Image: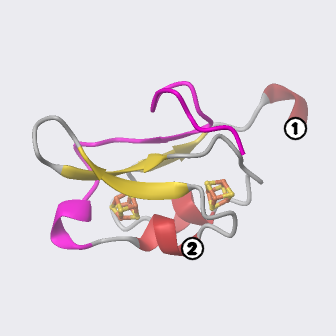
Amino acid sequence: MPLAQTATNVPVTIDDDKCIADKGCTVCVDVCPLDVLRITETPGGKKTAFMKYDECWYCMPCESDCPTGAVTVTIPFLLK
Ligand code: SF4
Ligand code: SF4
């Protein structure tokens, strides 16, 4: 699996302001069948989820199960 180079050029993006990984949430990481999401610490010291591996089935539980609506899955035009 290709390692994602930045958090913004991947299909799944996380709104750091909404993510409550700091409070112990790991829902998106836990529900992803491909295990491509991880929790990391931002330069500011806040924990947040991010897409570590640029691989996705667009199955959506990460977005639909996130308790704060922090996850956005961008489905490629050709798959819509
Ligand atoms: S499910 Fe939402 S709040 Fe929880 S770690 Fe993932 S992005 Fe953050
Ligand atoms: S859409 Fe599915 S495969 Fe893609 S990151 Fe979310 S849970 Fe994982």
Residue count near mark 1 (Cα–Cα under 10 Å), binned few <14, some 14–19, many ≥20:
few
Q: Position of residue 4 (x, y in %)?
A: 56, 34
**Which amino acid lies under the numbered mark 2 shown in the image of this protein?**
Val
Residue 79 tag number: 1
User: For disc 2, does the CB lie below 8 Å from ligand 2?
Assistant: yes
Residue type, label 1: Leu
Q: Taking 37 as reference, is 1 above or below it?
A: above
In the rendered structure, which disc, 2 or 1, sits on the residue that comes first in sequence?
A: 2
Given residues 12 and 42, the one toward you in this image is 42
Majority secondary structure in the magenta region = loop
- Name which residue lies at 43% across and 64% down: 66
Query: Which quarter shows the C terminus?
Result: top right
Residue corresponding to mark 2: 31
Q: Residue furthest right?
A: 78
Q: CA distance from mark 2 to mark 1?
A: 22 Å
Residue at (45% x, 32% y) in the render: 7
| The stretch drawn in magenta includes residue 2 | yes
Q: Of 30 and 68, which appears nearest the observer?
A: 30
Taking the spot 69% from the left edge, 63% from the top edge, the residue there is: 34
Asked if the residue at tag 1 contacts the one at tag 2, i.e. Cβ–Cβ closer than 8 Å, the answer is no
Residue 35 in the image: x percent, y percent? 61, 64
Q: Going by the image, does 74 lie left or right of 58?
A: left
Is residue 27 placed above or below 19 in the rendered structure?
A: below
Q: How many marks?
A: 2
Does residue 47 belong to the magenta stretch? no
52 sits to left or right of 17:
right
Q: Quadrant of residue 11?
A: top right
Give the x, y percent position of residue 76.
Answer: 77, 31
* Residue range of the region highlighted in magenta in the rendering: 1-24
Local SS, label 2: helix
